[in-house]
Image: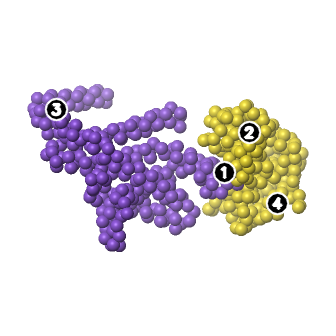
Chain colours: A purple, B yellow
Amino acid sequence: MAISKRKRAQYTRYGVYVVTSVVLIAMVFFVDWNKLQDAMFRWELVKDQFPGILTTAARNTLIFTILGFAGGLILGLLLALMRLSKARAYRYFAATYIEVFRGIPLVVTLLILGFGIPIAFKWSWPNPYLRGAVPLALVAGAYMAETIRAGIEAVPKGQMEAARSLGMSYSRAMATIVIPQALRIIVPPLTNELVLLIKDTSLISILGVTEGTIDLARYGRNGVFDTANSTPLIVAGLVYMIMTIPLTQLVAYMERRAKAAGK
Amino acid sequence: MSDIVVSIRQLNKSFGDNHVLRGINLEVQRGEVVCIIGPSGSGKSTLLRCVNLLETPTSGQVIFLGDDLTDHDCDIDSARTKIGMVFQSFNLFPHMTALENICVAQRKVLKRSAEESEAKARALLARVGLGEKADSYPGQLSGGQQQRVAIARALAMDPTVMLFDEATSALDPELVGDVLRVMKSLAEEGMTMLVVTHEMGFASNAATRVVFMDGGVIVEEGPPSQVISAPQEERTRAFLSSVLNH
């Protein structure tokens, strides 16, 4: 006997509920919660993380994020303008750059710039923050370039034409008319990229850290080595969420507002 | 200085295989109001956009006050400050108020002071009947109001000639009149105007000369009494009867 699509969807949903309930009940009865808490969330170890996890580790994560984001934004804007340029050389350069840095894992870029280049040129990074943030910015710039380009292309062509018809040069029209409108369009996707960047800073510690430049993830990991317990990592994860969730909520808010505004 | 403001010579424009303008010659004298009419696809908007080089001509010359704008050494940005343009879709800057829309190019291009450009902007807003709307954003204005702000924005540069590219085509019928009135008063004050329009009433009343285009060429031109009331060419007659009988 054939059953209607709606009925079938209903049965499927009941099935999912039943299975989920069984799994949850099994977890309640069979997982040793005391053991789990003992291994991952011991209060005295949570307290031990403070204040260092905020005053040093979270602070350094923020420094890497801000440097990486600011650098990436400037670089991304430049690359986006080059991709939209009439000059073929600029377009090719930007397209190649973007493909290269999006194609290579961040860890590889970090290692090449953090170790490879200094060894090759017998040179050393003047500042440990830059050593981590510059590769981060170079990769972030490649991603942001595509976002910014899409934003610029989303501004109606008539805006550039009206500005040019008033005697503005191409670059002035871009700077005063097109880019301000493009930025509004791309704030939500750029904020999403900021969230990714916050988490990507956790890779920087692959270059080695000193007491002063330690970031959140490494701080948590060192805590695990010191205490033979996972609690410090859990705390580090929570601190990441305290930074990222307000941003993702902000994006959700902006998107709701944009939808309500009818555009 | 001669009294010829715009001189278009042997102008050709192609988009790929599409030969849109085929050897256009047109001269506009100071104070003239030239209305360009014709069926869609006849090339009239492209012709207008070639005058300030928003479209680059494929060949031919556009001479503006004696300077060849198609010459690569020509400072097109400075020439454009003297050529006001009004677009079908208004193209106001949505992130700026009406006042800021009118001030931005005065400040950034003509380097006028904030006070001077604002005084000018307010006077022009009053003139187009929108003195109250200085602080409104384009999104808060009706189409007719937006288009009048756009006209004020172009006039703020003190242009020698104004180009109107189907300025009323995107408007609701009841809003067309306000914009046409502003254009009419400009014409009466002696502004040199090049107007692409479907408004035959405006062409009859305000134009000093009507140019009928079809298929990328000028088919017929002359005073409105001739081209609109007593067209000589069969194509002009066919077009006008299809437009006027609606």
The answer to whether marks 1 and 3 sit on the same chain is: yes
Say what amino acid the circle numbered 4 marks. Leu
For disc 3, the chain is A
For disc 2, the chain is B
Callout 4 secondary element? loop
Q: Which residue is mark 4?
A: B65
Is residue B234 visible in the rendered structure shown here? no
In the depicted structure, whether residue A90 falls above or below residue A219: below
Looking at marks 4 and 2 on the same chain, the residue that comes earlier in the sequence is marked by: 4
Residues under numbered marks 2 and 1 in contact, where contact means CB atoms less than 8 Å apart? no
- Which disc number belongs to residue A163? 1
Give residue A211's position: percent from left, percent from top.
Answer: 27, 53
Quadrant in the picture for the N terminus of chain B: bottom right
Quadrant in the picture for the C terminus of chain B: top right
Q: Which residue is mark 2?
A: B148
Callout 3 secondary element? helix
Say what amino acid the circle numbered 1 marks. Ala
Give residue A30's position: percent from left, percent from top.
Answer: 10, 32
Residue pictured at 49% horizontal, 59% vertical: A79
